[in-house]
Amino acid sequence: MNIRINGQEANIQVETEKTVGEILAGLEQWLENSGHRLSGMTIDGELINSGSIEASFCRNIDSISTLDIITSSLQELTIEGLTHVLEDIEEYENLDFDGKQRYAVLWEESPAARLLAGEIPELFTWITQTFSGEGLSPQALRPAVEERLREIQDPMNELGKTEPIIAGICVRLEELPLDIQTGKDARAAETLSFFSAIAGKFFRIFNLLKVMGFPLAEIKVEEKPVAEYISEFSAALREIVTAYEQRDTVLVGDLAEYELSPRLRNLSAALLHTGSVAVPVQDA
């Protein structure tokens, strides 16, 4: 049996595998490591659809001449999934009361929902809650989905937009000890909320750059690998979370001013530097 991946002959040696399903199971780890997912399959020129996929998995490879496997990058699939979600939000808004009551169950069976459940579980939860009439309103959900879509489509451009925001957040982190001491609890809580949102964005973009093939362990900023900046930032973040859980407000303030603020500035600069000096390494 000949095996081709995206039209190219694949150097795959069949050993103990007897069925198409066993072949695909063996490829699963390779696909995951390369940032790709199975998106289609053809057996001897016949396109396998959702109705025939289960039977095709049981096909004995001795009965097959050519197996064509079609893959898509996780980035491409996620962009497609999030684009469908924006269309789904619009569809949901136009439904009557009864239609909205049934929509969440139907949406969870969609390919976009299954993809997001595995790849962006927190966003999947938000969407499900919205379509169930809970959590975020459709109007509030839409910009959250659009933000994730922009990050995946062009992470470096989205990162560049955060530069002026970072400066403001760092100033507020440096002022956090005084806010705590003077009883400005609402402002202190707002500062931590802003910081949490931007930290989450940085972690998402860092992981996206890794998936896209940016050599973050090799690119250096001031003699330090970019990957080390995220490690230092993560360590400081763990410290402040522990201090917050222990209600040690003095330590929370000190960590915010002397650890998180400078590390956030350094991480932002390091990631922006990455986009200016490197191009991603594309997997074959």
Image (cartoon, rainbow, N blue to C red):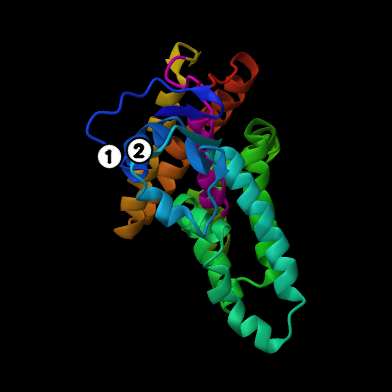
Please identify the quadrant where the N terminus is shown.
top left
Q: Position of residue 207 (x, y in %)?
A: 48, 36
- Marks 1/2: CA–CA distance: 6 Å
In the foreground, 198 or 74: 74
Amino acid type of the residue that numbered disc 1 sits on in the rendered structure: Lys
Coordinates of residue 137 in the picture (x, y in percent): 66, 73
Question: Residue at 38% of width from left, 31% of height from top?
Answer: 30
Quadrant of the image occupied by residue 98: bottom right
The answer to whether mark 1 and mark 2 are in CB contact below 8 A is: yes
Q: Which mark is residue 61?
A: 2
Q: Main secondary structure of the magenta part?
A: helix
Which is more N-terminal, label 2 or label 1? Answer: 1
Residue sitting at 61 percent across and 77 percent down?
A: 103
Region of the chain picked out in magenta, as a range: 194-218
Q: Nearer the viewer, residue 10 or 269?
A: 10
Residue 227 picture quarter: top left
Q: Amino acid at mark 2?
A: Ile
